[in-house]
Amino acid sequence: MAKKIAHRSFNDVLALLGGQRFDVAPAQEGAKRTPNAVQVRKYGCAAEIATAPDGTVEILARPGWLLNGEIARVLDRGYQKFLKTGKLEIPATADHLRAIHEFTQELNEAAGATSLYNQALGTTSNVYHYDRVKGRD
């Protein structure tokens, strides 16, 4: 018999994150600006969340490392992972990836999101660009 999943409301998730020592602040101006969006931060990582139409949590900006006030996405080039923002790109260290992974796990657990096997193993990249397939779509 399938288990019934209890979905947490946005306010319940904010209270839970505050209790777990996440910094919660209004979201920065950006492309996905939504009213009442908040940015949650911990371990040098950040994500932006807002209220979904059904009252649960919607993740607006995927968790990533915070670089110069902007959430960096993880870029995989096959031989190494990088942290990339609109203006800056730096090589990702093992400490960066561990922090992003731990932050993502804690955020998903607080939000009541589904835990996927491949994401539980380690940090997944937002974008994959391999040098051997350059120029191919």
Image (tube, rainbow, N blue to C red):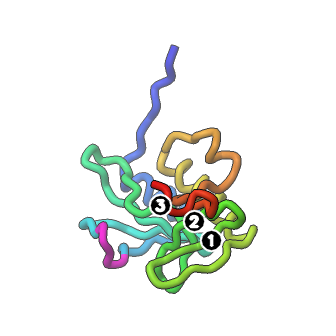
Q: Is residue 92 left or right of residue 48?
A: right
Q: Which residue is mark 1?
A: 82
Using the image, tell me which numbered label, if any, was put on residue 1. Answer: none
Looking at the image, residue 63 lies above or below residue 58: below
Q: Which residue is mark 3?
A: 62
Labelled pair 1, 3 in contact (Cβ < 8 Å): no
Q: Main secondary structure of the magenta part?
A: loop
| Name of the residue lying farthest toward the front | 135
Labelled pair 1, 2 in contact (Cβ < 8 Å): yes
Residue 11, quarter of picture: bottom left
Instruction: Find the magenta span and give its range.
Output: 28-32
Image coords of residue 10 (percent x, y): 37, 53
Which of the pair 27/23 is nearer the observer?
27
Q: Which residue is mark 2?
A: 75
Quadrant where the C terminus is found in the figure: bottom left
Magenta-drawn stretch contains 113: no
Residue, x 60% and y 75% (percent of image)? 44
Q: CA distance from mark 1 to mark 3?
A: 15 Å
